[in-house]
């Protein structure tokens, strides 16, 4: 009988540890003025009233503790309305780039299997360099160019375009297209945000590790951190709690990646988009970075690795991009106007955003499904308003 009770206790202990979230404290204990912080509620509610978003979930992280966590509006409007909850799972869209793809590459870098100055053509011989049209001088694309969006690759490759040119939307067709497509600028001289950069990074991760990106990220990032609701492919119970995105002719997208290149060509497992997650899991990931690469006795990256990962590389200052993260490019408006100069973050097309301020040891995770139901919602201005309101509430 005692043995039975012991194993029951052990089971619940393991279950509890496996499902744990970050410690939650009051906003006042975290250094916020609650009255000032609560202004963010009206900012978000006003956006919902104006049909800019159907709903949202906000989490404010301070000193590796949850200081504010709240859901707003609806996670689905059609065919039936469903309320948003703090446990809602979102299509993270381009937040996939830094959280899954770039972090995976940094893991390989720390394992001594790759370096930032490696030529992409070293791994893929068909990957053509940029060629000067006047001098015929060639310049190779290197891994650091992919991560900082300075490779010169075009922004995107829509499935319709691939079908028209190659009569195919297969993954290998996309790979061949990226290898040979015209380079638009000399590598390292011009910033142009491109999903093709991160499709290539995915190929590098998979070639070097021998694992699909989704499996590699799960093994080396999400499982060690116990990010239980972060994955490329959701199970049945997770699908029931997933925010809807756009309504297509085939129906409402729920648990299927919104991005066409990731959905049609890459079949959901893609370097540019495809990850699903919650505010709680993203808070754990942010805590890992703020804690210099380690969380809950699990080390994902080294302190020097995190420093390199989240700061602009030497010689790339004018572009405002770190190794997958955005510090001060034209895409960084989600940081607002009050956070420190070291702040970094990223956004996603579906309406997601994460901002991390290492000086204040704070993160703002603001997830919306602004593309539901008709891809007409807008969050660019809203993200800045949210960040400003939260930053202004931090008084200690």
Image (cartoon, rainbow, N blue to C red):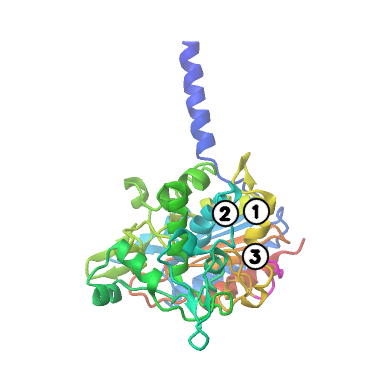
Secondary structure category for the residue under label 1:
helix
- Give the percent coordinates (x, y) of residue 152: 50, 76
Name the residue carrying label 2.
106
Q: Name the residue under label 1.
A: 305
Give the main secondary structure, helix, strand or loop, of the magenta stretch.
loop
Closer to the eye: label 1 or 3: 1
Q: Is residue 66 above or below residue 183?
A: above
1 and 2 marks in contact (CB < 8 Å)? yes
Q: How crowded is mark 1: few (under 14 residues within 10 Å), some or many (20 or more)?
A: some
Mark 2 or mark 3, which has the lower sequence index?
3
Q: Measuring from the top left, give residue 121's x and y in whole percent.
A: 47, 64
Depicted 231 relative to depicted 154: above or below: above
Residue with the most extreme bottom position:
134
State the separation of the CA atoms marked 2 and 3.
35 Å
Q: Is residue 201 magenta?
A: no
Q: What element carries label 3?
A: helix
Residue 210 appearing in the image: yes
Q: What stretch is highlighted in magenta?
A: 337-344
Instruction: Work out whether 132 lies above or below 62.
Output: below
**Residue density around tag 3, few if under 14, some if 14–19, many if 20 or more, within 10 Å:** some
Q: Name the residue under label 3.
A: 37
């Amino acid at each position: 009988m005692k043995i039975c009770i012991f194993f029951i206790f052990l089971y619940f202990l393991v279950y509890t540890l496996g499902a744990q979230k970050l410690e939650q404290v009051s906003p006042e204990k975290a250094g916020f003025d609650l009255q000032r912080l609560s202004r963010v509620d009206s900012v978000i509610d006003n956006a919902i009233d104006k049909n800019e978003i159907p709903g949202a979930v906000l989490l404010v992280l301070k000193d590796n503790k949850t200081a504010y966590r709240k859901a707003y509006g609806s996670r689905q409007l059609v065919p039936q309305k469903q309320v948003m909850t703090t446990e809602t799972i979102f299509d993270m869209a381009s937040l996939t780039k830094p959280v899954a793809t770039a972090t995976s590459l940094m893991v390989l870098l720390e394992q001594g299997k790759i370096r930032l100055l490696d030529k992409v053509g070293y791994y893929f011989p068909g990957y053509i360099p940029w060629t000067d049209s006047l001098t015929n001088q060639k310049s190779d694309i290197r891994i650091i160019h992919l991560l900082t969006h300075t490779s010169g690759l075009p922004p995107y490759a829509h499935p319709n375009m691939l079908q028209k040119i190659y009569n195919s939307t297969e993954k290998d067709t996309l790979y061949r297209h990226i290898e040979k497509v015209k380079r638009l600028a000399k590598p390292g001289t011009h910033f142009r945000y491109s999903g093709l950069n991160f499709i290539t990074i995915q190929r590098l991760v998979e070639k070097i590790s021998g694992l699909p990106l989704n499996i590699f990220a799960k093994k080396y990032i999400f499982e060690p951190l116990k990010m239980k609701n972060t994955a490329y492919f959701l199970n049945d119970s997770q699908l029931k709690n997933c925010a809807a995105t756009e309504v297509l002719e085939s129906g409402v997208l729920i648990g299927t990646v919104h991005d066409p290149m990731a959905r049609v060509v890459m079949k959901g497992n893609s370097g540019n988009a495809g990850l699903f997650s919650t505010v709680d899991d993203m808070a754990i990931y942010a805590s890992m970075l703020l804690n210099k690469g380690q969380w809950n006795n699990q080390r994902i990256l080294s302190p020097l690795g995190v420093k390199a990962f989240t700061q602009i590389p030497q010689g790339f200052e004018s572009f405002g991009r770190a190794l997958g993260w955005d510090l001060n490019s034209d895409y960084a408006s989600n940081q607002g106007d009050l956070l420190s100069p070291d702040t970094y973050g990223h956004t996603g097309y579906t309406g997601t955003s994460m901002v991390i301020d290492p000086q204040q040891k704070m993160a703002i995770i603001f997830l919306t499904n602004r593309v539901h139901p008709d891809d007409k919602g807008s969050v660019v201005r809203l993200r800045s308003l949210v960040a400003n309101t939260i930053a202004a509430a931090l008084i200690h």
